[in-house]
Image: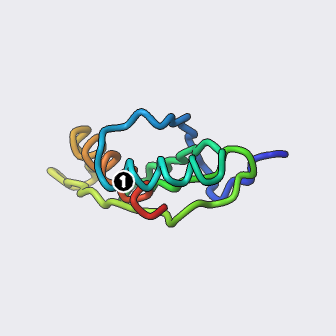
């Protein structure tokens, strides 16, 4: 069955249940043990935020809710726009943790 995608640009990251202990990992492990399905996390990085959403790897159905984490764009001079890669990295973690926690 083809994976149904809900975003125009989607980077799919395979995700196994080998994440650190905590409430998010417990929810993910519970979903996997109940359904027998693996989870795929889709990530969309845009100009203002990065978003993550969990999908059932077998059906492509959305599992839980999507989570967005905004980052700042700096304008040091007219016509310039800059973002900090560290912000992308930190917000990626925040978005993925939020999506996993919503399962």
Where the N terminus falls, by quadrant?
top right
Q: State the image coordinates of residue 86 (x, y, percent, origin top left).
A: 21, 39
Q: State the image coordinates of residue 41 (x, y, percent, origin top left).
A: 53, 46
Q: Nearer the viewer, residue 103 or 66?
A: 103
Label 1: state its secondary structure. helix
Give the residue displayed 29% in from the left and 49% down from the top.
22
Give the residue displayed 32% in from the left and 55% down from the top.
23
- Looking at the image, residue 45 lies above or below residue 101: above
Q: Nearer the viewer, residue 32 or 100?
A: 32
Q: State the image coordinates of residue 84 (x, y, percent, origin top left).
A: 22, 42
Q: Nearer the viewer, residue 76 or 64?
A: 64
Spot the residue most to the front. 34
Spot the residue most to the left. 76
Which residue in the structure is indicated by mark 1?
24
Q: Residues within 10 Å of mark 1 (few under 14, many from 20)?
A: some
Residue 83 appears in the picture as rendered: no
Q: Is residue 53 left or right of residue 19?
A: right
Give the residue displayed 37% in from the left and 59% down from the top.
98
Give the residue displayed 58% in from the left and 45% down from the top.
39
Q: State the image coordinates of residue 87 (x, y, percent, origin top left).
A: 23, 46
């Amino acid at each position: 069955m083809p994976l149904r995608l809900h975003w125009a640009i989607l980077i799919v990251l395979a995700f196994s249940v080998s994440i650190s202990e905590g409430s998010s990992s417990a929810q993910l492990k519970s979903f996997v043990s109940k359904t027998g399905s693996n989870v795929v996390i889709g990530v969309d990085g845009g100009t203002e935020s990065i978003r993550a959403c969990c999908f059932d790897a077998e059906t492509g159905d959305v599992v839980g809710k999507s989570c967005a984490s905004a980052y700042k764009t700096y304008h040091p001079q007219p016509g310039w726009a800059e973002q900090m890669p560290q912000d992308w990295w930190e917000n990626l973690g925040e978005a993925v943790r939020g999506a996993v926690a919503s399962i």
